[in-house]
Amino acid sequence: MKIPYSYTFRNLWARKWTTLLTVGGMALVVFVFSTVLMLEEGLRKTMVDTGSYDNVVVIRRSAQTEVQSIVDRTQAALLESQPAIALGGDGARMISKETVVLVNLNKRESGRPTNVMVRGVGAGAVALRPQVKIIEGRMFRPGVSEIVAGRSAADRFTGAGIGEMLRFGQREWRVVGVFDAGKSGFDSEIWGDAEQLMQAFRRPVYSAVVAKLSDTARFDEFKKDVESDPRLTVEAKRETVFYADQSEVLANFIKYLGLTLSIIFSIGAVIGAMITMYASVASRTAEIGTLRALGFRRRSVLAAFLLEAALLGMTGGVIGLFFASFMQLFTISTMNWQSFSELAFSFTLTPAIALKTVAFALFMGVVGGFLPAIRAANLKIVDALRAV
């Protein structure tokens, strides 16, 4: 015979305080586990959304970031002539020759200095990044010491708001606009005219060249052409891949640190569930004996106790995931160790993360309840009934 499900629910309710403590411990572990996954996903999404699959980024061969890269004007001109690059409405190649520098700005709230990426862009930069929209003010004018700030940069750094002034490269730069880049990495940057920034920083070379392909399938052709040209010492990557690579070190650090903490906390949660279930078996010895005497088999008793443990894990998982979902309301910023600049990103909850979280909670519950369930199933009828 099979023990009714209502029996399991009644037993959990009869020991509600112990149940609540166990569920609370599991919910805390699940909260940590899910927020780590959300943090990693938020970082990955921010960096991947920064790029477009149709765009290609060309930097100096062996350079890891744009800051480390050098592309001289001659090489930039050769890249601009590549036939795989799309033509714009005016018949010009859809390309942006860009220079990237790091400047030190103070945070508005704490006043602490941090590195901020300033990107000098060409006239075609916005056409290459359709996610970038001016939401306040206007775009900077070429040939003038004007800049526009990403929404996150404008909010977080002193002097980066519209109408304010920033001083770097021995010049005063007026912020004439704020842009929204769709929660991508560009939101943490400041943009200006590439030629003006190169003059200000006495930098006669570009950092990278970004181009839109006429057909995304021509990437391999473009890559082969530029990397085999002896006049060029560059390498080409799809923009999505390039920016995903920029977050790899930080994402792996977050993942491994978070998983380590989750494992440590989960051991405590499993032990808590085990203690709860052992206590439940000890207090229900006579009850288990009665069930066995009524004809319920060992496997039915085992299944009932495993179900009880799984319900503890499932409840803790749902509660932990519920509270973790509110972390999506927050945006955090940290140093990207590969680009050496401040990067803002948000927690991101996906269906895959929700499924992993619930599975993790169920695993904790079942592991914690397995040994007590075996003990309950193996109780001898005569010994159990003596406890009456």
Image (cartoon, helix red, strand yellow):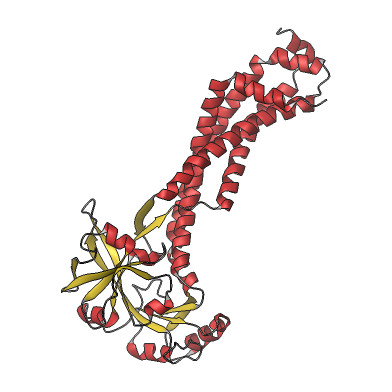
In percent of width and height, residue 73 lies at: 33, 88
318 up-or-down from 350: above or below: above
Q: Is residue 261 visible?
A: no
Res 94 → quadrant: bottom left
At 54% from the left edge and 53% from the top edge, which residue is drawn? 350
Res 177 → quadrant: bottom left
Q: Is residue 114 left or right of residue 274?
A: left
Q: Is residue 161 left or right of residue 306?
A: left
Image quadrant containing the C terminus: top right
121 up-or-down from 306: above or below: below
In percent of width and height, residue 293 lies at: 81, 15
At 69% from the left edge and 30% from the top edge, which residue is drawn? 306
In this rendering, the count of numbered labels is: 0
In percent of width and height, residue 316 lies at: 55, 35
Q: Is residue 382 left or right of residue 108?
A: right
325 up-or-down from 237: above or below: above
Q: Is residue 171 left or right of residue 256?
A: left
In percent of width and height, residue 172 lies at: 16, 72
Image quadrant containing the N terminus: top right
Nearer the observer, 50 or 254: 50
Q: Is residue 224 visible?
A: yes
Nearer the observer, 351 or 221: 351
At 35% from the left edge and 55% from the top edge, which residue is drawn? 333
